Image (cartoon, coloured by chain):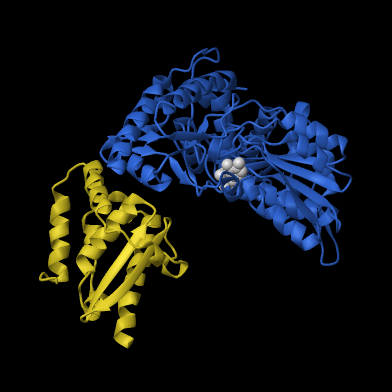
Chain colours: A blue, B yellow
Amino acid sequence: MKTQAGNNKIKSTQIQTIHPAEIRKEFPILNTQVNGKPLIYFDNAATTQKPKVVIDSITNYYRNQNANIHRGLHELSDRATQQYEQARKKTADFIHAKEKAEINFLRGTTEAINLVASAWGNQFLQQGDEIMISQMEHHSNIVPWYRICKSKGCRLKIIPLNDVGELNMETFASLLNAKTKLVSVAYISNALGLINPIQKIIDIAHQAGALVMLDAAQAVQHTKIDVQSLDCDFLAFSGHKMYAPTGIGVLYAKRAILESMQPYQSGGEMIDKVGFDEVTYNELPYKFEAGTPNICGAIALGTAIDFIQDTGMDNIQRYEHELITYASDALKTIKGLRIYGENAKNAPVISFNIEGLHHYDIGSLLNQYGIAIRTGHHCTQPLMDFFGISGTCRASFAFYNTKEEIDRMIQALNHIIKMLTK
Amino acid sequence: MNRQSIAETEKEIVEEFELFDDPVNKYEYLIDIGHQLPEMPQDLKTDANIIDGCTSRVWISAVLKDQRVYYQADSNTVITKGIIALLLRVLNGRKPAEIIDAQLDFLQKINMHNLLSEQRSNGLQSMIRRIKREAQKFIIA
Ligand SMILES: Cc1ncc(COP(=O)(O)O)c(C=O)c1O
């Protein structure tokens, strides 16, 4: 399972505790200074930084391997094809897909959801059918469904939230009926870090005869995923949120479903035979990968997966849990600070506001201390409406972050509060 | 009434901000200035007075007295209030034509990182456009 690069950089798969000082050496950008201060990067839910092995894999590809795939008989093309397909295999293993043909390399989560809404939706939705999403979804898991429902005369139903912002599971069950064709929810909420009870959602939805799509954009980097044991029908994620470059992402779907679907985009790669009167399509997964794909991105995603596996998802999860617990306890010492959607099962993402202050001021000022957080609605306007706010401050951690960095954020916040409330 | 020229007031502000090395202190100063912005009467905070294109909410209204423009403005974020306060310090009590011709590049010159960020500077441009548009109205009338 280990690559050469992985073996060189991280020696032991047996690391029990994460040593952030060691991990940080793998991420060159963490040495950056911002406003004369060392960068503290707490915007990992937006995108993670990239380890050297991933950066090296990108340069190595263009220095030594660049060729188009599945086309040439020549040596370089053959090598690039092998690497690309090896990355697909690694990705399949990473989420425990039954076979690599179920892994479609796309641009990211957004494209994956659009593909399903468009290709599957156009083909299988009838007027009067229902799609269900939740109140906490990212806009990219709302708008594609909104559009396909509009164009097919279907109803978009919303799973409501309870007081603390968790999915209301009782209402969810009662909203399902024979017309519900698909339920699409976030595995982990990007704005709140809440981990949704997806196994229950899948089981209940399947009993009602609906398919389930998981938006795993905030999950793949924090938790082990096993699509077979979950039994989800579709799963989408983005490479750039899991230490890989931008522009590469994945749609997993069960083979039978992919086979039943018509292509999404068309052109080269995805065809078998082309005549002007008849076109037959290529087999999976090429059917959904029209045109020259992001070869380098896919290979680098494979390297990022190695990096995660070598570090150990259990180790990552344990350490990130320590970080979020520490951050949450520390933030609670600040008077007037409210945390949104906090429960015992949070991914390392924490959303808050401070009474009387605007998230925009807080974010701008933290930036002066070299601290990068995200402020605003986090592409979840319906969720912000639920809380009756325009946005939050969101700090999101990765396993290269440290408790010392959290301490520095708390110090900065205390200073900022004094400044703003004078 | 304003004795300095617009350019002079701009220069004065730039010099004040040059006293600070650490951007945190620059912001602290800007926030203090924001806190001193005279309160805008609630009945002026109408939807029509909201400036579109700003991340934070900004209201502005203008009146003409003795051939000179006087603005009142407010924002729901303190940093923006600081920026508004600076703009009003430069522009309040000027003739409409002066306002329309004003360079207003002092905000770039004080070199505060966030003021120049893409999102912020779009908001700032909207604000300046609106301020000039208000002045323009008095020329046509
Ligand atoms: C939960 C969730 N879904 C979808 C997306 C969209 O991902 P991308 O922009 O990589 O397509 C994001 C990223 O912001 C996200 O956090």
For ligand 1, the image quadrant comes to top right
Instruction: Locate residue A141, reporting x and y percent.
Output: 66, 47
Task: Looking at the picture, tell me which residue is in the foreground, B106 or A76.
Answer: B106
Residue A288 visible here = yes
Task: Looking at the picture, tell me which residue is in the foreground, A251 or B38.
Answer: B38
- Identify the residue at horizontal 55%, vertical 15% (top origin): A13
Q: Quadrant of the C terminus of chain A?
A: top left
- Identify the residue at horizontal 53%, vertical 44% (top origin): A246
Residue A284 visible here = no
Q: Quadrant of the N terminus of chain A?
A: top right
Locate residue A166: give its quadrant: top right
Instruction: Locate residue B31, reporting x and y percent.
Output: 27, 48
Residue A212 placement, left or right of B77: right
Farthest residue to the left: give it.
B3
- Identify the residue at horizontal 70%, vertical 42% (top origin): A160
Instruction: Locate residue A321, reporting x and y percent.
Output: 53, 22
Instruction: Locate residue A339, reporting x and y percent.
Output: 50, 33
Residue A174 placement, left or right of B107: right
Task: Looking at the picture, tell me which residue is in the foreground, A232 or A68.
Answer: A232
